Amino acid sequence: MSEQIEILMPSMGEGINEATLVKWLKKKGDQIKKDEPLLEVSTDKVDTEIPSPAAGFLLELLATEGDTIPVNATIAWVGGDKNTVVSASAAKPAASSAGHAAKDKPAVATTTQVAQAGNKASPSEKTATQAQVQPRSTSVVNSGPIKSSPLVRKIAESNSVDLAYVSGTGIQGRITKPDIEAFLKQGVAPLSHFAQPAAFSGPAHLEHGRLETKKTDQLETLEGVPVRREKMSKMRSLIADHMIRSVRTSPHVTTIFEIDLHRVVQAREKHRAAFQEKEGFNLSFTPFFVWAAVQAIKDHPVVNVSVDGDDILWKDDINMGVAVALEKGLIVPVIKKAGELNFVGIARRMNDLVVRSRSKKLTPDDVQGGTFSITNPGMFGSIVSSPIINQPQVAIMSIGAIIKRPVVIDDMIAVRPLVQIGLTFDHRVVDGEGGARFLSTLKERLESFDEPTY
Amino acid sequence: MTKYDVIVIGSGPGGEVGAIRAAQLGLKTALIEKEPHLGGTCLNWGCIPTKALLESAKTWVKLQHANDLGFETGKVSFDWKRIMDRKQGIVDVQRKGLRFLMKKNKIDSFEGHGRIAGKNKITVTDKDGKVTTLDTKFVLLATGSRIRELPFAKSNGKAIINSDDILSLTTVPKSLCVVGGGVVGTEFASLYGRFGSEVTIVELAPQILPSEDADTVKDLVRYLKKQNITIETATKLTKVEDKGDHALVTTEGKEPRKFEKVLISVGRAPVTEDIGLSIVSIKTNPGGFIPVDEHYKTSTDWVYAIGDIIPTPMLAHTASAEAIHAVEIMAGHHAPVINYDNNPNAIYTYPEIASVGKTEDALKKAGIEYKVAQFPFAPMARSKIDDTTEGFVKIIYAPKYRELLGVHIVGAKATEMIAEFALGKVLETTIDEIAHTIHPHPTISETIMEAAHVAVGGAIHM
């Protein structure tokens, strides 16, 4: 059999159009089993090994390490016979459309040599089958508490492995060192769920500031203070990169409104029990803010754009990213097309995303495509905060703690639940007036909140 | 005829434990033992009687130092017969305990020689030659080991003795040559040396206890020398002659020397002959050991083997663990594969040596990167209180994740202390968790924490 199978750069999730080839794990001519790791790729969301979708011999590798390759481009050919010749038309370089053409490939010449070595089969007679490489399943293996060990946790942290994906063979299913070593070898690093939703092109390499420490045998000090060095987790590192890029990209300006939530509180109290019964989850304050923000964006779409050089990209959809704090770090799942949802729709989607965030069941798609973000440090007691914009968005809304305060209404002192809501925006496209107008609309919507729409 | 689920051949710490576990799992179980007593080498001629005697040696030394603790004892003396009787009493009670456990777990006991007689058939031949055939689904071979003899210096129970004979000596020999400085030889040297024998250990390898870490052995040797023990390593024995009331021992390049007794302790050999292996086409390796898979199954589906007859460490606790694993597999349970790197070693000399994991030498040879954190017992208050300041805890760990690679303890209670590290290794603990575990004060276990602190950033009490 001399069937040829074309190996394509797999899709790593919506919004990812290309990936960088970090390393070929096999050489040309090597035999490869189905599902055996073939190459390592890196995107801004996921670093992973890609397994071969088919068994056979590697007839051609069409990209060079370091190349950025578009999704669905041909990256290699696998065939059942070592001496199979890759047809000249098929052996075209993969990365041409991305402008990173594979440079080192005298592909045709090489195959010719192989042909001379004895295989007479005509390339044109061969059947070329396309096979889409799938990243290894990102479906969750473990749910509930994960049994592992201190050693495994250290290995996982330094290799950015989410232990939810590692199956344990130890006592009572405990994940052991051999398990995680096998996992690492097999090449799965699905930390994608933790990735930030920003869509940078190319790998996000940022030069973090380096510090000059002094090291003796056992002790490392910084300006005389003993320090313990710990490698950032992949998620931490990603967050760090994104934050630095954002601050460098956007001139941040924050404006804050104080909003009276007494109608929201009343509505929530009134419907809470019924809501719990009907929808099966607790009605939190967040959906109110998300809903109001969506309404305000509709009136002031300038906070829902992206800046591309001198151009402004206006967006049809309102995809609302809502930051969810995790044990270590955070994740920003996105309520897609929030502009088309009513209040209850938003509440349902919100609840679903929060539940899946905490149980690590988000898909890569859930964290992509946000057009505006909301963060709620008020949950932890913060009154006012100045968040960093989630690139390539241009605005992020921050919610403070809801606190009862005395306020003067019609020259009388009343006790009202107040919240400070801030909008941090990119002054390249949004001016102080635009930010204030957005918050003004938000305030009006919340203070006049009537009934949740079912 | 009853059909058994599992028949266990051999009632040592492997077979006995395997039989009980099998019964607990609901398997119809039988146990075959050719000796009149259950318990195998461990209970009858090994672990138990030797440790009983070593405890007497410890007490004897302590009594001699009772003055230091404020006691006026006058001249203390020992009665060797009573020491031997006490040892035998412990053995007898444990034997009875085993009988009881068999009965309690409804395990059928057969006395006689067990053999594989055909597919799923086991025969028991009793001492009168009567043969009983038993049907079984599985057999667990746990036939253990026998003393290895030196062809040119066979023990005869008189001046030349083996480790069985030495357990029934009626007096403490004035002089004792121990041929082979392995665990058995070194323990007996430490026993008889403390009771007053002039002991010489003759060992072919460059260190006694060759599988132990060089540092702990070196420290132990210092103390053995204070127990009337001379150690001759890298020394080749050429001749041993029984001269009636004494033996003459010749080592290479030296004149023959006189000893009252010569103990031949050059290891143990698996008992795999005459158990019917050929009937099911099981072939042993050149050392006589039975090859098995990770679940202790032999090349024949229904035959499992554990303990001293397979090529794993010849230790009682290892055999027990293997037996439990094997019968759990037979019962269809999931059992995690045994990691021998977590298997502890224990040597009951004074001070004791205990270890788990790799030695420094082995790591060096394998080219594995490591670091050492070590702490002595001497500065610890509890060690002074107990008057046991000998030795140290040595932890070898990998710099990258600070994983425990090997732990080697030499000290009065080393064999008890090693269990913490055996658990630590099983749980894949790193040295940080050991350092952050609060150890009770004042105990000698604090030394473990101190050794870990050395790695984490400096010991406290040094």
Image: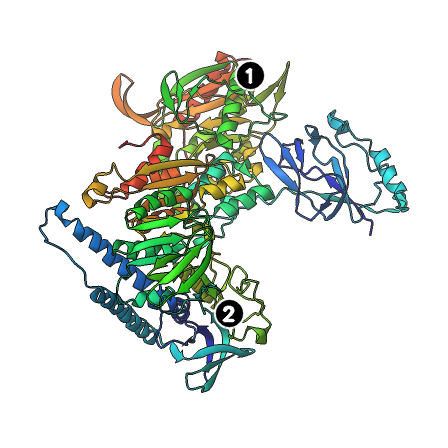
Q: Which residue is mark 2?
A: B272
- Splitting the image into 4 quarters, where does residue A60 fall? top right
Towards the viewer: A419 or B434: B434
Most extreme residue toward the front is: B255
**Figure coloring:** rainbow
* Position of residue B256 in the picture relative to residue B332 (left or right): left
Q: Position of residue A161 (x, y in %)?
A: 52, 39
Determine which residue is flagged by label 1: A249
Say if labels 1 and 2 share a chain. no
CA neighbours of label 2 inside 10 A, class few (<14), some (14 to 19), many (20+): many
**Image x and y of residue B75, in percent:** 12, 55
- Density class for disc 1 (Cα within 10 Å; few <14, some 14-19, many ≥20) is some
Q: Is residue B331 above or below residue A244?
A: below
Point out the frontmost of discs 1 and 2. Answer: 2
Answer above or below: position of A17 versus B155. above
Q: Is residue A309 visible?
A: yes
Give the distance between the C-alpha atoms of the residues marked 1 and 2, in whole angstroms: 77 Å
The answer to whether B455 is drawn above or below residue B439 in the figure is: above
